[in-house]
Amino acid sequence: MESIICYSQPTSTGALRMVHSGLWYVVRTRAMQHQKAVQEMQEAGIQAYCPMMRRETRHHQSKKWIMREYALFPGYAFACLTYRDFGKLREARSVVAVLGDAEGTPAPIAWSIIEKIKDAQDRGDFDVLRPPVRRLKAGDSVHVKGGPLAGHYVSVTNVVGRRAVKALVEMFGGLREVEIELESIRRVA
């Protein structure tokens, strides 16, 4: 079997995009050791990826908001493996197994699935953040996720109660103020 190489390629925005030239597999890791497993695989020369999500919670005593990262699929990561890499996986203490079919043959997954998960993570689609109503203010930029303005970036002009904002959007040859529900937007850093 010839050697297959996995690599990342810069996109027009400068972000790294994974390019398919190898086979991706789901790797099961020891409990709570997904980051260590990814590190061990990368040290062994294996491209590995563990999708993460951010969660914002309020501390029960101090009442401060705390943001933490969690594995999107606890106990699992993805790895781009060649025939020779399977031997390297045996040396990784935090890796338990490669998922496979009923006979135990490792089952590859499409690289496009990995790329879609990475893109969704980069957009913050998996994040569970506190309600944005307290954080949004006039002048903030937001990305519209749903509705007729989906895909547009708009500037908030006013927060309307707890469920909507008014924002300026460029359409019909000028700037128009529209009301958008909070569920349909995501704040842009």
Image: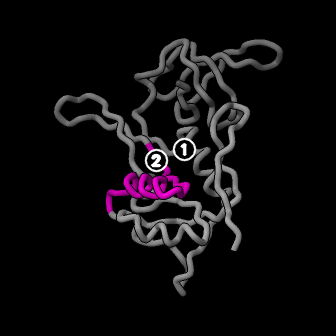
Q: Residue at x 64, y 65 (%)?
A: 23
Residue 79 position in % (x across, y down): 54, 60
Magenta includes 137? no
Magenta includes 52? yes
> On the image, which quarter does residue 134 sit in?
top left
Direction from residue 162 to residue 139 in the image, left or right:
right
- Tell me the amino acid under the disc marked 1: Gln
Direction from residue 2 to residue 44 in the image, left or right:
left
Q: Residue at x 48, y 67 (%)?
A: 88
Farthest residue, direction left = 61
Give the residue number, with chain letter if any, for mark 2: 52
**Figure check: 129 above or below 89:** above
- Taking depth in this image into account, of 41 and 142 the one nearest to the observer is 41
- Taking depth in this image into account, of 135 and 22 the one nearest to the observer is 22
Q: Quadrant of the N terminus?
A: bottom right
Q: Which residues are magenta?
A: 31-53
Give the residue number, with chain letter if any, for mark 1: 121
- Tell me the amino acid under the disc marked 2: Met
| Gap in angstroms between the C-alphas marked 2 and 1 | 7 Å
**What colour scheme has been applied to the protein in the rendered image?**
one colour
**Figure check: 108 above or below 153:** below
> Circles 2 and 1: CB distance less than 8 Å?
yes
Q: Residue at x 74, y 18 (%)?
A: 170
